[in-house]
Image (spheres, helix red, strand yellow):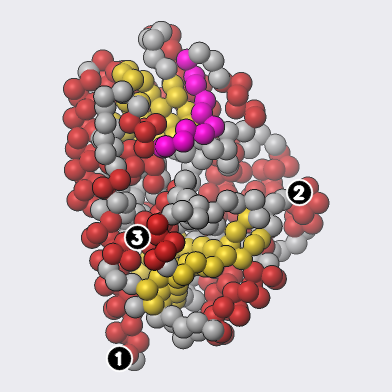
Amino acid sequence: MKILILTNQVPFPPVSGYPIVVYNTIKGLLARGADVTVFSLKNARTQVDAQDPILSKIQFVTATINPDLNWFRLMMNFFGRKSIDLARFYQSAPASKFRNFLKHNEFDVIQIEGLFVMPYLSIIKQISKAKVVYRAHNLEHQVTEGMANATRSPFMRIYFRKLAQRLNRFELENLNKPDAVITISKADESQLRNLGCTVLMQNFPASIDLSEYIADDTRCEFPSIFHIGSLASASNVENLEWFIRNVWSDLKNLNSGLRFHIASRDIPDSFYQYENEDVILYKDVGDAHQFINSKSIMIVPLRTSSGLRIRIIEGMALKKCIISTSLGAEGIDYQHGKNILIADTPNEFYKYILQCITDRKFAEKIGENARRLIEKQHNLESGGALLMDFYASLSAKSEVN
């Protein structure tokens, strides 16, 4: 089966949530014998990992975009009707390259990875006979609403709300245009149905290659707490600031030896105000798996957003005890108190962190159970097989019709 995967960023190397999900999807499909092509929109500054072994097994095509924003573009867009988030990724040069590429290549299935490349659907419909699958990584309008709630600027709050409205309108207008929709969390699947999605839809939890996740606690700092993930959006920054204000300050007063490690490739300058001898910031940890292995308790204080946090999957695979909000753990078939700890209030975070740092065996048991859950429900082999079966059912349905 010939499959084209259309992405809004290069997944080589897979260094954050979106690229990790896409990268593991490619690996899973290759393991099932699929002929995979990846067409990625590429920021001119992005460095492709040309040594990645996957590249020798696929056809890889890029089209350069300029997604950068400035105040002039923001102001011009403020008075327009289109979402600037979508306009950043749909530009004339990459659209022309993609159109020409489709004219010379045929596929059985084309998978659109996320809303920001959904505008290219019109080109696909004009040229290709392939079945089109849209994967909703998030409900993007909800992510932007979270940014509106998080920002302290009145102007930016108004602006983000306008963006959220435009993204929501675009999502609704295009919801039933693909042949099928897949999600990575059951919560998003349910919401898309409520929004009016009537095409074939199925939830496929994110999968990872478990052979690459080897737990090693020989150099683990215990007790310690840590967070790893993007701080590119105001909402993600606000989530961590909420935790520092409402939980960390009390923990620090109780335990003078506890340290909070925060790793992100995009730490904003303003966040460095929190750095001290007990709050350590890492802009580049090198090997993320090694970093996770070196710390003990993972904190996910997510209070806005949708989709699935792939870093939680990775942390569970590395046998970490994770304390997360219920929103942060969406998309995972967890059992609170068995393979994860769910905390939605400062008091709950405080209570569970205190329990974990004073009872190492309890924390380790949570981590052991977490690994078993990932082995059962998020392993690459079964995930790739299920996705290929889904593609085959689409093709079979087309032949019957």
In reply to whether residue 302 is colored magenta, the answer given is no
For mark 3, what is the residue?
27
For mark 2, what is the residue?
70
Question: Quadrant location of residue 55?
Answer: bottom left
Magenta part of the protein: which range?
278-288
Foreground disc of the pair 3, 1:
3
Q: CA distance from mark 3 to mark 2?
A: 37 Å
- At which x and y percent is residue 255? 38, 9
Q: Earlier in the sequence, mark 2 or mark 1?
A: 2
- At which x and y percent is residue 229? 47, 38
Task: Report the residue at 22% width, 32% height from top.
Answer: 366
Q: Is residue 108 above or below residue 239?
A: below
Instruction: Compare residues 182 and 186 and report the one nearer the observer.
Output: 182
Task: Report the residue at 42% width, 67% height from top.
Answer: 58
How many marks can you see?
A: 3
Horizontal side of residue 69 vs 333, given as left or right: right
Q: Is residue 3 above or below residue 321?
A: below
Instruction: Compare residues 212 and 244 and report the one nearer the observer.
Output: 212
Q: Earlier in the sequence, mark 3 or mark 1?
A: 3
For mark 1, what is the residue?
400
Q: CA distance from mark 2 to mark 1?
A: 51 Å
Q: Circle 1 — which element?
A: helix
- At which x and y percent is residue 368? 19, 35
Q: Circle 3 — which element?
A: helix
Label for residue 307? none
